[in-house]
Image (cartoon, rainbow, N blue to C red):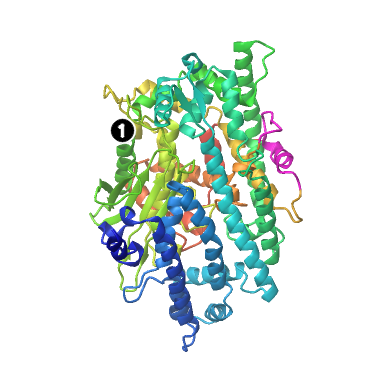
Amino acid sequence: MMSEQKERKNPFFFPYNTPHDVAPFDRIRLEDYEEAFLEGIRREDEQIDKIINDPRKPTFDNTIISIDDEKDGEGYYDLLDRVSSVFFNLLSAETNDEMDALAQKLSPVLTKHANDIRLNEKLFERIKYVHQHHRKLTPEEKMLLDKCYDGFVRSGALLDAAGKERLRQLTEEASMLGLQFSQNLLKENKAFTLHITDESQLDGLPATAREAAALAAKEMDKEGWVFTLDFPSYSPFMTYSTQRDLRRQMYMAKNTECIHDNSENNLDICKRLINLRRELAQLLGHKTYADYVLKHRMAGNVRNVYKLLNDLIVAYKPTAVKEVAAIEQMAKKTEGKDFKLEPWDFGFYSHKLQLQKYNIDAEMLRPYFELSKVIDGVFGLANRLYGITFKQNDDIPVYHPDVKAYEVFDKDGSFLAVFYADFHPRKGKQGGAWMTEYQGQWIDRKGENIRPHVSVVMNFTKPTEEKPALLTLGEVETFLHEFGHSLHGMFANTRFESLSGTNVWWDFVELPSQFMENFAIEKEFLRTFAFHYQTGEPLPDELISRIVKSRNYNVAYACLRQVSFGLLDMAYYTKKDEFTDDIIPFEKKAWAKAMVTEQLPDTCMTVQFSHIMAGGYAAGYYSYKWAEVLDADAFAVFKKEGIFNPATAQRFRDCILSKGGTENPMVLYKRFKGSEPTIDALLKRNGIRRCKK
């Protein structure tokens, strides 16, 4: 046993010898990470020393490319990037207490290392020289140079010694707090369960929800049924359960996460993160953190963000007020005129009204959205649009049995990418859905196009002992959304990895994902995969018609909900002075203009708002609505030219999906469409008439 342990080698240090050089998840152990991180840091320091001690005059090739591309050389690969991509992706998708503890230990080490590079004066002098004196560059090279120079400036390269030291303190503390925020939220989410042993308390719940709850109970060695705060469990319960007191219990558990008097409380963490980011921005010469962020966004400045959000409020609020009034009326009609609609009642009575108006709900559609067929449909859509094909490869190691791994081939048969799909919730997995990469795309100095390894991670309804995984239409849309991000990654075809795939401005990154959602209600698409899992019958035309008619049900309410999150985000990150307010009342005031339902004083969104606290969307949540304008505008082009028109799809691929961040996103978009986008297509899609202010 001892000799085996002695002979074992850390897999990060050697060629993987796996299909397409994918990560060998089956060989990686917890103890491998720290050793690889520390050696990766040492190697990167060594590489930086070579650059700054190069006696030659600084050039684009011997400085900028050397910084960006540390994978070149004689068998040299970026060890730090290699281990980071595995560790931090699994920290979100398959973590445990030991991983969390290691992340806490390594976070300050990694932040210090990043600061050591960004604040290296000799390195910046070389970059600055190249920025001022360089050969004629291609547009992509110029973009890389500008991104490199500006990245150093935005990371404090122009600060004096005291400023640099303060920046180190701010970034190291923010990194630790962001990590703590996420770990607290995961623990709070997994800590709550609603355990039911009286079958009468399941009244109203569809069979799929009951079966999933029975399976959850069995997995916990409990009798009866268990409901959790994971979306596939929480959402059906809030929509269908007739037990108002239990709906209230679920709602309050969900909406009070991380505000309890325990070690998972995120209130002070949020307040501190807001102030750390404000101070960092001001240290770097900006009035607010939003000003700092928006310099590199399509929106450009705070004024333009508020213009978008306010325009949406003006356009959508009158309709949203009517939508809420209709649901209140339905509740009173059902329960009596004195009934007061509470937040835990909204989904329940909204569903009743939807049934009355359109005779449709998520459960009617589930039997037609069996996960394996949905996968076939989504892959088939990509094939029809772009000619690409997917082949499952069981020889590709995965990090959990739930994960499926595919090889992706281009229309000419050449290898395009590795694609991982991770569909179901579990103990060590964050909630929500996201796309990520284990390897980006770039072209090495020998001209070889290194292809990406992309992954989509979701939390869909699990299969039960009686039924396969049957999805809701909303889950199908989520799949399409994340798959759109993955296409952005898989089609990447740029020279430099830091400009490839989804490495674009954040209010542009959601265009490819939200664009794909449009197909979810297209009859031609549904006809390719929506078959009843038992009978094989296709989704009836009548149901498709009802889906289309109901697509804008509560669309204004949903829009204002997103706008409210954007307002909250901007309220925090446009602060010029120290943030000292109590989070909960501040939150209620910040988004009041977009609210059309009563707010409860003892609930809080901020403490679980991962996007703006720990997910990179700080001062950027408006991006979803910004990109929605783009996606509606882009899909209108497809509707005009044919939603499966291969020439239109190829233009979308060539102008947007394959270009990454090599050019200004508006330039890329105009190259695709021929003109700038307008809000008109979004208003038309949502059935909203443009209102006069």
Residue at image point 46% right, 86% down:
54
Magenta stretch: residue 587 in it? yes
From the viewer's side, name the closer residue of 27 and 136: 27
Q: Residue 483 location in percent, x, y?
A: 39, 45
- For residue 121, above or below residue 152: below
User: On the image, numbered disc 1 is attached to which residue?
Assistant: 529
Left or right: 302 as drawn, with respect to 354:
right
Magenta stretch: residue 130 in it? no
| Residue 160 shows up from this direction | no
Within the image, what quadrant is residue 84 found in?
bottom left
Residue stretch in magenta? 581-603
Amino acid at pointer 1: Phe
Q: Residue 559 location in percent, x, y?
A: 58, 36
Dividing the image into 4 quarters, which one contains the N terminus?
bottom left
| Residue 526 shows up from this direction | yes
Q: Residue 470 location in percent, x, y?
A: 36, 29
- For residue 602, above or below residue 322: below
